[in-house]
């Protein structure tokens, strides 16, 4: 549930989450647990923890009372913090114990109704008065229907409405994004970059790229060399615009460019491509989705290997 190593700490209360990202699982998402249960799978190990959880939660509150004001950094992780009651209990506790030396980060998929999102942001604005800074880290991978498939439960319009509010109405909170580059996201990343470039006209949004390597079928390296060349060329061009004005831009752009170049030149792994299609077909049977409609290029890639 929690990890602390003064002067830094983070808390992961539980796996309560309203999304079922394709590369995630029941450890980090209660929505995954429910789906697996409905499919007849044994999920008892993910459900039978309530007594132990309550005991650990009480220990955590006691730890917070004793140690929070000594922290230099503290992160609120998920599941999805915005739908966890413990998050707001924790925020209230932090507000009551000002720590002007603490940097706070809160992570979110931003998939709560805009009315509820605004309510939560008002609470974070109160917290911002008591800490050194708050970074809001929005998790997303690409844009449009592909994003809604990859992060099942994600709604692009909801995300945009909440991000618009964060960028335009919350100057006390620093907007940041974490993007996961996976075997499905690259052809649809440019549209997300274009959206961030628009937000940057109002307020700079910091973007960090991460690469999915586990499960292996979602590692973007599994496809034949050149599969994403056209998309990567556009991504690299747009990244130059998106990161303009960011400190240490050249170093980070080199890192991102190298990551995509490695993906573009990696040898194919046909067995993993086959397993990816099989896995998506399985997910479709639970979710009523259709990967061949969302990712038509995946129907053909790798068949000649």
Image: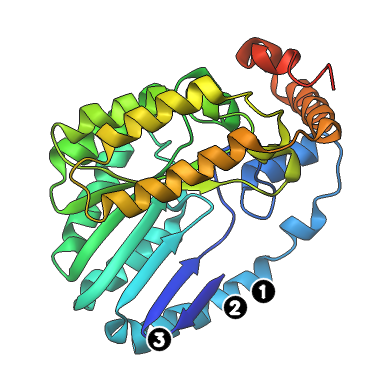
Q: Residue at x 61, y 46 (%)?
A: 212
The answer to whether the residue labelled 1 contacts the one labelled 2, judged by CB atoms less than 8 Å apart, is yes
Decide which of tag 3 and tag 1 comes sooner along the chain: 3
As drawn, the label of residue 55 is: 2
Residue that mark 1 sits on: 52
Mark 2: secondary structure: helix
Q: Please identify the quarter of the rendering in which residue 109 is found.
A: top left
**Can you say which quadrant of the picture contains the C terminus?**
top right
> Looking at the picture, how far across and down is residue 1, in whole percent?
57, 70
Q: Residue at x 55, y 29 (%)?
A: 185
The answer to whether the residue labelled 3 contacts the one labelled 2, judged by CB atoms less than 8 Å apart, is no
Query: Would you say 161 lies left or right of 172 here?
Result: right
The answer for how far apart the CA atoms under marks 3 and 2 are is 22 Å
Residue that mark 3 sits on: 6
Mark 3: secondary structure: loop
Q: Note whether residue 205 is visible.
A: yes
- Nearer to us of marks 3 and 1 is 3
């Amino acid at each position: 549930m929690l990890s602390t190593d003064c002067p830094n700490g983070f808390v992961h209360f539980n796996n309560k989450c309203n999304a079922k990202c394709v590369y995630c699982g029941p450890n980090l998402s209660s929505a995954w647990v429910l789906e697996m249960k409905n499919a007849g799978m044994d999920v008892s190990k993910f459900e039978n923890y309530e007594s132990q959880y309550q005991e650990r939660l009480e220990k955590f509150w006691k730890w917070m009372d004793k140690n929070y004001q000594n922290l230099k950094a503290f992160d609120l992780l998920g599941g999805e913090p915005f739908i966890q009651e413990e998050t707001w209990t924790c925020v209230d506790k932090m507000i009551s114990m000002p720590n002007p030396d603490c940097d706070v980060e809160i992570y979110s998929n931003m998939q709560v109704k805009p009315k509820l999102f605004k309510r939560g942001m008002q609470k974070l604005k109160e917290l911002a008065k008591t800490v050194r800074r708050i970074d809001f880290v929005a998790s997303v991978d690409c844009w449009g229907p592909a994003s809604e498939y990859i992060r099942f439960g994600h709604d692009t319009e909801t995300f945009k409405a909440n991000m618009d509010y964060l960028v335009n109405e919350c100057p006390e909170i620093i907007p940041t994004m974490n993007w996961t580059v996976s075997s499905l996201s690259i052809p649809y990343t440019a549209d997300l970059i274009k959206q961030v470039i628009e937000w940057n006209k109002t307020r700079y949004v910091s973007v960090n790229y991460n690469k999915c390597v586990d499960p292996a079928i979602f590692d973007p390296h599994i496809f034949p060399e050149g599969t994403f060349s056209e998309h990567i060329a556009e991504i690299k061009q747009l990244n130059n615009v998106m990161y303009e004005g960011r400190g240490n831009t050249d170093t980070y752009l080199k890192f991102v460019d190298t990551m995509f170049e490695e993906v573009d030149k990696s040898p194919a792994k046909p067995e993993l491509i086959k397993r990816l299609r099989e896995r998506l077909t399985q997910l479709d049977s639970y979710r009523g989705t259709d990967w061949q409609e969302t990712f038509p290029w995946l129907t053909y890639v790798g068949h000649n290997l």
